[in-house]
Structures are given as structure tokens and as C-alpha cells.
Amino acid sequence: MEDFIETVYFLENPEKNITKFATGTQLRYEDVIKEVFGVACINDLHMMLQYNKSFQTSICNSHGISEKKLTLDKILRVASKLDMLRLKKQLLNQQYDKIIDETHQEDDLPINRPFDATIKLQEGIFQWDDSNFSYNAVKPGA
């Protein structure tokens, strides 16, 4: 049996200025959708996209798109490498706020692994690397 690899998702509610990362398990079993969007489930997001005018407008403005191009993947999608780089930068900034110590360089400031050691992103499978506190692509067949 193959090991289960968690998919990491990026959620964004531009109306409330909330962004969050979550695993598939968290989306299924925790209140992540409710925390970010204020609705119980993904099906309710379809209704919000269809009928909530201020929500539609905030997404269109955030992404520079017209209402005709409004889709669920603008606010809930599988995270990308770029998303994870933004998360790393955010985590580093949080560490800087906690540790005001000139002996630390950006490269050696520890970041706790935010997800499982192996995750799935838009670009494929990634493995956590403790030496640089980030996820690196796993080569196929490796």
C-alpha cells in the first residue's frame, strides 16, 4: 500500500482579507471553510460566488478579473510552489518578530515544518528539507 500524501490548499477571502493554507484532511474535518469564508462547506461557497455581490466584487478586484471569469479556484485551490514561498516568507517574518537577535541570519532562522514531511502541490510532490526549511520537489522515480 502506498503512503498517503496530503494535498495542501490555498484559501483566500479578499472581502475579509484572509488567506490560509490547509490540508485536504483539515478541509474535510475541521472548520477551515467556516473560519475563512463564514460558511459551513464548499457547496455554500458556490452559492456565495453566485449570489453575494460584495464577495464577487472583492474577488474580481483582488484578481483583476471580470465577473464572467469568476470561478471557485480563485479562492480555493491546490497551493503552488509560489504560494509556499510566500508562506515561508511569512513564517520568517513571524520568527523575526519573536527573535530579535543579531546572531541569526535569514538562512539559519528555524521554521517549524508547517505540514507533513511529504506534500502534494500544483507542480507535484514535495519533501521537507530541514537544512533550508522549505519543501523541495521530489524527482519522479526517486
Image (cartoon, grey):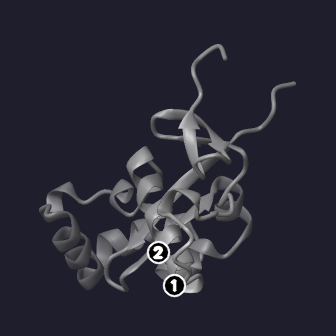
Q: Residue 102 appears at what percent x and percent y?
A: 51, 77
Looking at the image, residue 27 sits to the left or right of residue 124; the answer is right
Q: Residue furthest front?
A: 103
Q: What amino acid is labelled 1 in the image?
A: Asp
Looking at the image, residue 133 sits to the left or right of residue 117; the answer is left
Q: What residue is rendered at 37% in x and 54% in y?
A: 73
Classify 137 as above or below 43: above
Q: What residue is rendered at 68% in x and 63% in y?
A: 112
Q: Quadrant of the C terminus?
A: top right
> In the rendered image, which residue does mark 2 sit on?
93
Q: Residues within 10 Å of mark 2 (few under 14, many from 20)?
A: few
Q: Quadrant of residue 47?
A: bottom left
Mark pair 2, 1: CA separation: 6 Å
Q: Residues within 10 Å of mark 1 (few under 14, many from 20)?
A: few
Q: Secondary structure at mark 2?
A: helix
Question: Of residues 130 and 137, which is closer to you in this image?
Answer: 130
Looking at the image, residue 55 sits to the left or right of residue 94; the answer is left
Q: Residue furthest right?
A: 1
Classify 134 as above or below 106: above
Q: Quadrant of the N terminus?
A: top right
Q: Residue 15 appears at what percent x and percent y?
A: 32, 83
Classify 111 as above or below 18: above
Classify 48 as above or below 140: below
Q: Secondary structure at mark 1?
A: helix
Q: What residue is rendered at 59% in x and 84% in y?
A: 98
Residue 97 numbered mark, or none: 1
- Give the mark count: 2
Question: Do labels 2 and 1 touch, CB within 8 Å?
Answer: yes
